[in-house]
Image (spheres, rainbow, N blue to C red):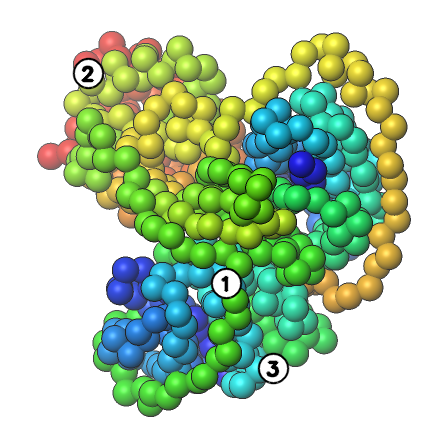
């Protein structure tokens, strides 16, 4: 089964997710890695990962990612190499063009995939629905090929140097209708660096009201923890984004991660599941965060927080 | 300025789950409907554009009559009219095809979708819709600076790690809107009552085209050992948490 992996890179560096895609891909068959960029040759060395049979470079005009250029390149690669499976990361860039290419080419498609199996010649993808509370197996009958966007941090990044052959593919550049202008750093006016903390007390939507932030701030201070938050609290403007844990915030790895009222959206879990010990307090016994926590508490957050405060 | 906002009534699963007899989906009795969170931000963004530039905000959804509740919530926020498309499968390509048919006839200046729906998390419908409409697309947008005269918009795309990709996009375009881009307004009681009276334009999907996938089995995942659950009174729980924290921080 031939596999096409589309490498993702930013500012001249191959991103980790690319190595994860190689790990997933090489279990299915010979892997071709596509490197699409202004100077793709400079990334060939980094893309030459153990298990990669071939690297194809596609030169485009844009210095960083652009939707139209990537879509045209991936469509040309699929037409030329006819892979059975095309693997992209479930990332912001892939979200911008992957489904477009797939619907246009009549490919089977699924995103946020966290399991792939082969049954004879058929691909079966596993992904979650309904707040990660159930899984589903998906099949793609009749499709010429399948495009899967894989959930980051599920497959281990492939290590080691490969011995891939290198070739290039000429792709006619479309006029870009969405032009990259600049990359802007997230605000660095941060009071604290949560990635350096050894003990994070993290709060989520379950705390209910803005007024309750103060109580947990005090509890964190007493316990000697640094306060971090999940995305909804940043969206609501209750806390600055510098405190946000998750895919669109910071990836953290403290010795202890104590979570109050965080249900555990996939994007949040990706940012904290490598923590040493995870303790989660939540009122919903089915909350997805209990899947990654070592210790779980199903109780009223405020009762537990109040009692905890008395101990410090 | 005409903006079309594509919304979805999502289904939320509570503490318990039972599956339908064919095992392909959750039994609807265990699912509670709600407006997809991302879509309230998309609707708010459209309303703010209308406040600045005038024009119209048109809602489109795919779903049964029950999903009109989601449309009415957005009507109560201030959208002008609403279209519901019947008989559409729930996978993102089937939804995108049904939407494309209706949206293309609207000749909108902008089409807004939520980044993803909370019950399926495919982040695919908006991007597939852009392809079917042959419009440019920007995904995961946290800021829209629309220039009606130039027929372009400068938008911020939120990459991983909080990095922002600033893009100039030709319009009409499809933008998928991220949460936090604005503060969705609350509808007042009067607006909610008025929205109940609005007639919703119901269409039938033409159908055709392959779905993105076919569900062959839905199941509760094996959680492995999962978390060790700490029971007891709040005081006992707190004591146990404190002792674990103390032990692990050494």
Q: Position of residue B212 (x, y in %)?
A: 67, 63
Q: Secondary structure at mark 2?
A: helix
Give the left or right position of residue A230, taking residue B210 as reference: left
If you read the primary sequence from the N terminus, does the residue marked by circle 3 or circle 1 appear first?
A: 3
Residue drawn at 44 percent across, 61 percent down: A66
Q: Nearer the viewer, residue A273 or B10?
A: B10
Of labels 3 and 2, earlier in sequence is 3
| Residue B115 visible in the displayed image | no
Q: Residues within 10 Å of mark 2 (few under 14, many from 20)?
A: some
Chain for disc number 1: A
Q: Can you tell which quarter of the image residue B7 is in?
A: top right
From the viewer's side, name the closer residue of A223 and A141: A141
What's the chain of the residue with tag 3? A
Q: Quadrant of the C terminus of chain B?
A: top left
Q: Are marks 3 and 2 in contact (CB under 8 Å)?
A: no
- Point out which mark residue A121 bears: 3
B230 or A84: which is nearer to us? A84
Q: Which residue is mark 2?
A: A222
Q: Is residue A187 left or right of residue A146?
A: left
In space, the residues marked 3 and 1 are separated at their CA atoms by 37 Å
**Residue visible at 43% across and 43% down in the picture:** B156
Identify the residue at horizontal 69%, vertical 23% (top origin): B78
| Residue located beneath label 1 in the image | A176
Residue visible at 80% across and 16% down in the picture: B194
Q: Is residue A69 above or below residue A243?
A: below
Q: In the picture shown, does residue B83 fall above or below A209? A: below
Looking at the figure, which quarter contains the N terminus of chain B?
top right
Q: Are marks 3 and 1 in contact (CB under 8 Å)?
A: no
In the rendered image, residue B79, in percent from the top left (x then y), is placed at 71, 27
For the residues labelled 2 and 1, the Cα–Cα distance comes to 54 Å
Quarter holding residue B10: top right
């Amino acid at each position: 089964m031939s596999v096409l992996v589309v490498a993702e890179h930013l500012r001249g560096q191959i991103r980790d997710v690319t190595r994860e895609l190689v790990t997933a891909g090489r279990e299915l068959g010979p892997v071709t890695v596509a490197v699409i960029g202004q100077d793709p040759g400079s990334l060939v060395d980094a893309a030459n990962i153990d298990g990669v049979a071939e690297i194809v470079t596609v030169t485009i005009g844009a210095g960083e990612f652009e939707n139209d250029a990537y879509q045209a390149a991936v469509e040309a690669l699929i037409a030329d190499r006819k892979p059975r499976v095309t693997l992209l990361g479930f990332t912001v860039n892939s979200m911008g063009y992957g489904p477009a290419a797939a619907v246009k080419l009549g490919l089977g498609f699924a995103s946020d995939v966290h399991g792939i199996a082969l049954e004879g010649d058929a691909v079966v993808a596993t992904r979650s629905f309904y707040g990660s509370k159930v899984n589903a197996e998906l099949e793609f009958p009749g499709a010429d090929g399948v495009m899967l966007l894989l959930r980051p941090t599920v497959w281990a990044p492939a290590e080691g140097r490969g011995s891939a052959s290198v070739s290039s593919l000429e792709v006619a550049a479309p006029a870009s209708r969405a032009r990259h202008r600049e990359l802007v750093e997230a605000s660095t006016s941060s009071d604290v660096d949560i990635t350096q903390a050894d003990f994070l007390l993290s709060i989520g939507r379950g705390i209910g009201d803005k007024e309750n932030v103060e109580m947990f701030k005090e509890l964190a201070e007493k316990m000697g923890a640094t306060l971090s938050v999940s995305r909804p609290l940043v969206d609501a403007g209750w806390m600055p984004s510098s405190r946000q844990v998750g895919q669109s915030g910071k990836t953290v790895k403290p010795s202890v991660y104590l979570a109050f009222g965080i249900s555990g959206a996939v994007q949040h879990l990706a940012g904290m599941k490598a923590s040493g010990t995870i303790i989660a307090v939540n009122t919903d016994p089915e909350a997805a965060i209990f899947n990654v926590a070592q210790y779980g508490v199903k109780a009223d957050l405020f009762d537990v927080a109040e009692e905890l405060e008395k101990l410090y | 300025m005409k903006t079309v906002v594509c919304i979805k009534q999502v289904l939320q699963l509570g503490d318990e789950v039972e599956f339908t007899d064919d095992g392909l989906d959750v039994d609807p009795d265990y699912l509670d409907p709600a407006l997809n969170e991302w879509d309230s931000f998309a609707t708010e963004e459209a309303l703010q554009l209308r406040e600045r530039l005038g024009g119209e905000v048109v809602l489109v959804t795919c779903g049964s009559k029950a999903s009109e509740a989601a449309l009415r919530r957005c009507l109560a926020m201030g959208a002008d009219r609403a279209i519901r498309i019947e008989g559409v499968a729930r996978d993102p390509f089937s939804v995108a095809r049904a939407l494309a048919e209706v949206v293309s006839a609207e000749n909108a200046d902008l089409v807004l979708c939520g980044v993803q729906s909370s019950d399926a998390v495919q982040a695919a419908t908006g991007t597939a819709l852009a392809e079917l409409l042959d419009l440019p697309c920007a995904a995961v947008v946290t800021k829209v600076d629309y220039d009606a005269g130039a027929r372009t918009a400068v938008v911020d795309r939120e990459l991983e790690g909080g990095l922002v990709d600033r893009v100039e996009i030709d319009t009409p375009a499809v933008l998928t809107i991220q949460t936090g881009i604005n503060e969705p307004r609350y509808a007042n009681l009067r607006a909610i009552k008025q929205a109940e009276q609005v007639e919703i334009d119901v269409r039938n999907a033409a159908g055709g085209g392959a779905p993105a996938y076919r569900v062959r089995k839905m199941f509760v995942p094996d959680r492995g050992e999962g978390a060790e659950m700490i029971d007891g009174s709040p005081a006992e729980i707190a004591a146990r948490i404190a002792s674990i924290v103390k032990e692990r921080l050494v």
